[in-house]
Image (cartoon, rainbow, N blue to C red):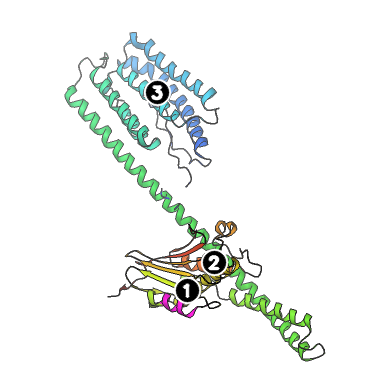
Amino acid sequence: MTSLVEPVESKPQSSSWLPGAALPAPLSPNVSGRDEGLRARLVWLTRLRWVAILGQLAVVWPALSLGWLDRPLLVCFLSIVGGLALLNIVTSRWVVRDRNPGVDMLLVQLLFDLAALTSLLLLSGGAWNPLAPLLFVHAALGALLLDGWRSAAKLAAMAVSIASVTLAPLAPPALPVFPTPVNVALPSFLLVALVIWGFTSWLTSTLGEHRRLLLNLKEHQERGDRLRAAGALAAGFSHEFSTPLNTLKMRLDRLSRGVLGEEDPDLVAAQKAADHCESVLRKMIGRRLEPGELRMENVDVHKLVERVCSSWAAGGRQPRLTARGPRHRMVLPALALTQALLNLLDNASEAMLGAGDTTSPVEVELDADDTRVRIAVLDRGPGWPQVVLENLGQPFVTTKIDGTGLGLYNAHALAVALGGRLRLEERAEGGAIATFLLPVEAFAPGELQ
């Protein structure tokens, strides 16, 4: 099925599809990488082929009794079955034990199975054998287990096999005359094989896309669960910590008006530390961003970003706004989005100050089209720290000495809650980019004229 973002997918495995062989159950999905997945498929293939070989030996006597296998051909029939057994032994002892069996080994194994099935059918009535439709199973297997040119190669081998069992079979004693003309049987078999191969290829592709989609949805759900858990933790911490912090500040104020005086250096340092703790708590309180808790407003996105840029200034630095595309009116949590943009602007300004740039403006880009709105904040600082890029969406991740790591966390939580995402990138000419991507369709009541 589909899937953001990828793990190697596995498909049901095959056995040797010979007359009389039972259909195997689908195998468990591969969970250990491409090479190990190929090895696991080959292991199952050899095991299921043993079942098919035993099945062939079991039908020898009924085939002789009912006249579907001529007695002079028995040695040839058993030789083909013995060849499959030898192939299984070779595969088990050398190929399966190899840690890197090669991506083409599965195709080779399936071609051997197809060749064996074709040979056995040629000895027992060809396309008119009651078990001849097992050839169509190989059409499905080629689409299920292989992809690209390998699947096409398997389809071509199927066409050759069908032509062989239709044009050059040996008539068994039970069927001295073939009931259906060759010019009818051959195109019919080819058409059915092509339809099965095409349908199975389409179904496999569709299921793969759905699987990837489910994996992405699961990843987003898990990320949302982590965000809610972190929000609950922060809210609980804030609640428990606020009362003793208020008590501490009141006692410090008493000391400043009493024996120590307002200029005592230790008291001043303690008051600054308490104020910093209070600032951190204010940032943490009320930051559990979930869709049901956001106050939505019908806003002009262009005007909202313009208002944020005009109201923000750091050390005389004014942001430079560039807007492109149509103007949209969207239903958004204006207050939360404003706070997130202010945090991104603060981060950009601090990064540029840390790099010694006090004159270059922070750049803001607003791009819009019919499907999404992009709001990007660009700076010319040192770029994103690797730890921040690797832990986007995790709270309390920061490289700042006095930072909390909640600015990007809140911005990311908001973007996820709105069905969008926050993307962090490096500028080609140096600096960092933080980009809000928001879907228009879900939140836009209409486009401004």
Q: Furthest residue to the right?
A: 259
Please give left or right for residue 242 compared with residue 422 in the image.
right
Residue range (magenta): 304-313
> Which sits earlier in the primary sequence, circle 1 or circle 2?
1
Q: Residues within 10 Å of mark 1 (few under 14, many from 20)?
A: many
- Residue 240 place in picture, x, y as percent: 67, 76
Which amino acid, by three-letter code, is at mark 1? Pro
Which residue is located at x 39 percent, y 32 percent?
A: 23
Q: Quadrant of residue 250?
A: bottom right
Q: Secondary structure at mark 2?
A: helix
Q: Nearer the viewer, mark 1 or mark 3?
A: 1
Q: Secondary structure at mark 1?
A: loop
Residue 305 in magenta stretch: yes
Q: Which mark is residue 408?
A: 2
Closest to the observer, 94 or 149 = 149
Instruction: Identify the residue position indicated by label 3 in the image.
Output: 112
Q: Which mark is residue 319?
A: 1
Which residue is located at x 42 percent, y 72 percent?
A: 321
> Which sits earlier in the primary sequence, circle 1 or circle 3?
3
Closest to the observer, 95 or 354 = 354
